[in-house]
Amino acid sequence: MASVDGEAAEREERLKSALWYSIGQFVDDALLADDLNATPQFIGALTELVYTQIANTSRDLETFSRHAGRKAISNDDVMLLTRRNEALEDVLRQELDRLRAAEGRGEQQQPVATGKKRGRPFGGGKGKGKA
C-alpha cells in the first residue's frame, strides 16, 4: 500500500513540475514583450493556484457525471460547470457548436419549454419522515 501512495505522490509531483514549466514558459512569453520578469515565487504560487483549480474542477465534473448516473464526463457536465461564468460558457458553447458542425451533426435541438414545471411533484409521496 505504501508503494501505491508513493507512486501517486511521485506522479503528482511530476504533474506539478510539468505545470510549473508550462506556466513559467507562458508567463515568460507574456512578459518578455513588456521587458518584465516574474520571480520563481510568483510562478510557484500561480502553479499552486492553477493546480488547485484543476483538482477542484475535476472533482466537480466527476460529481456531476455520477449524479447523472454516468461513468464518463460529458459535454453537459462541462457546460454545467461553466454556469456561473457567462463569458466562458459562451466561448465553450461556440466551440461545441463548431465541433458539432465539423462532425456534420449540426446543433442538436433543445427541447422547447411547455410551461410545465419539471422535477419531482410536490407532496403526495411516502418519503422519509412522513407518517
Image: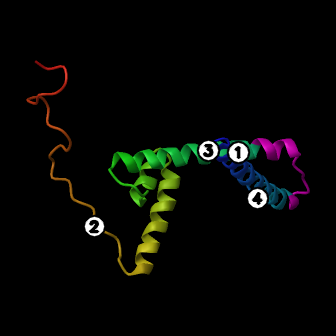
Determine the residue located farthest toward the left in the rendered image: 124
Mark 2 or mark 1, which is nearer the start of the sequence? 1
**Which residue is more in the foreground, 55 or 112?**
55
> In the image, which is nearer the foreground, mark 2 or mark 3?
3
**Which residue is more in the foreground, 114 or 127?**
127
Q: Position of residue 58 (x, y in %)?
A: 53, 49
> In the image, which is nearer the foreground, mark 3 or mark 1?
1
Q: Which disc number belongs to residue 109?
A: 2
Mark 3 or mark 2, which is nearer the start of the sequence? 3
- Mark 3, residue position: 53
Colour scheme of the rendered structure: rainbow
Badge 3 crowding class, 10 Å Cα cut-off, few under 14, some 14 to 19, many 20 or more, is few
Mark 1 or mark 3, which is nearer the start of the sequence? 1
Asked whether residue 34 is drawn in magenta, I would say yes
Three-letter amino acid code at disc 2?
Gln
- Mark 1, residue position: 6
**Residue drawn at (47%, 58%) of the image:** 90
Badge 2 crowding class, 10 Å Cα cut-off, few under 14, some 14 to 19, many 20 or more, is few
Q: Secondary structure beneath disc 1?
A: helix
The segment highlighted magenta reads 32-45
Q: Position of residue 25 (x, y in %)?
A: 81, 60
How far apart are the alpha carbons under marks 4 and 3?
A: 16 Å
**Which residue is more in the foreground, 128 or 77?**
128
Mark 1 or mark 4, which is nearer the start of the sequence? 1
Q: Is residue 123 visible?
A: yes
From the viewer's perspective, tell me whether residue 3 is left or right of residue 114.
Answer: right
Q: Which disc number belongs to residue 22?
A: 4
